[in-house]
Image (tube, coloured by chain):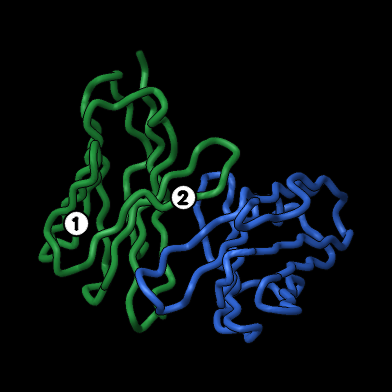
Amino acid sequence: GEDVEQSLFLSVREGDSSVINCTYTDSSSTYLYWYKQEPGAGLQLLTYIFSNMDMKQDQRLTVLLNKKDKHLSLRIADTQTGDSAIYFCAESTSGGSYIPTFGRGTSLIVHP
Amino acid sequence: DTAVSQTPKYLVTQMGNDKSIKCEQNLGHDTMYWYKQDSKKFLKIMFSYNNKELIINETVPNRFSPKSPDKAHLNLHINSLELGDSAVYFCASSFIGGNTGELFFGEGSRLTVL
């Protein structure tokens, strides 16, 4: 199987919360990331969490980490049409020189 | 000023041709990367250079040859292009091991091989 897995699609209504889930296999992962890719653009780091944290909140974004289950989630509150993009989960380890390994990305579609 | 810039943005060419994609970063980072994103949006690392030295070379055909003339540039040359090379190629840069490993990406170069 792949090192980082996430579902491919998520569709939500504007104003609802979106939750994008990710699982990873490397128990020595040090950092876990969420990147956002808008159409025709490169990836941009949205947020990251250090492996000794359970949760990180940044305005409308909440990241939850369950290290035991190797599960990472990104919750976007009050989702807007401008949040429509592909969201990539990624992880890095010190042994890998902190170079991220990416999942396949989740396409978030927000409709009015 | 664009932090990581790649040229060309679009490239359409015939099978068998040789082509290059250029990348430059003005962030002062010590490490640069090439990623390939296929039609299903899967993003896979191809190469990484740290201070002009190759540090990652994933299983990539040797038709692909990266060249880093200095820390700010990493170019990708592809010989004898094949249909399966059609993809979006992303350049990225970072400070390796310096902090969180955040990568800064260029906007991508869409290669179409006919």
Q: Amino acid at mark 2?
A: Gln
Residue A1 in view (yes/no): no
Are circles 1 and 2 on residues that touch, CB within 8 Å? no
Q: Residue placed at 67% from the left, 55% from the top?
A: B5
User: Which residue is nearer to you in this view: B39 or B10?
Assistant: B10
Q: Residue furthest bottom?
A: B53
Q: Chain of mark 2?
A: A
Q: Residue placed at 56% from the left, 77% from the top?
A: B30
Q: Position of residue A10 (x, y in %)?
A: 32, 32
User: Which residue is nearer to you in this view: A57 or A81?
Assistant: A57
Rendered image quadrant of residue B51: bottom right
Judge left or right: residue B15 versus residue A34.
Answer: right
Q: Which of the marked residues, 1 or 2, is nearer the chain's N terminus?
A: 2
Q: Residue placed at 40% from the left, 69% from the top?
A: B101
Q: Position of residue B95 (x, y in %)?
A: 48, 74
Rendered image quadrant of residue B77: bottom right
Mark 2 falls on what kind of element?
strand
Q: Are marks 1 and 2 on the same chain?
A: yes
Give the residue pinned by disc 1.
A71
Q: State which mark lies toward you, 1 or 2.
A: 2
The picture's colour for chain A is green
Mark 1 falls on what kind of element?
strand
Q: Residues within 10 Å of mark 1 (few under 14, many from 20)?
A: some
Quadrant where the C terminus of chain B lies? top right
Q: Amino acid at mark 1?
A: His
Q: Is residue A80 above or below residue B61?
A: above
Give the residue pinned by disc 2.
A44
The picture's colour for chain B is blue
Q: Is residue A80 above or below residue B16?
A: above
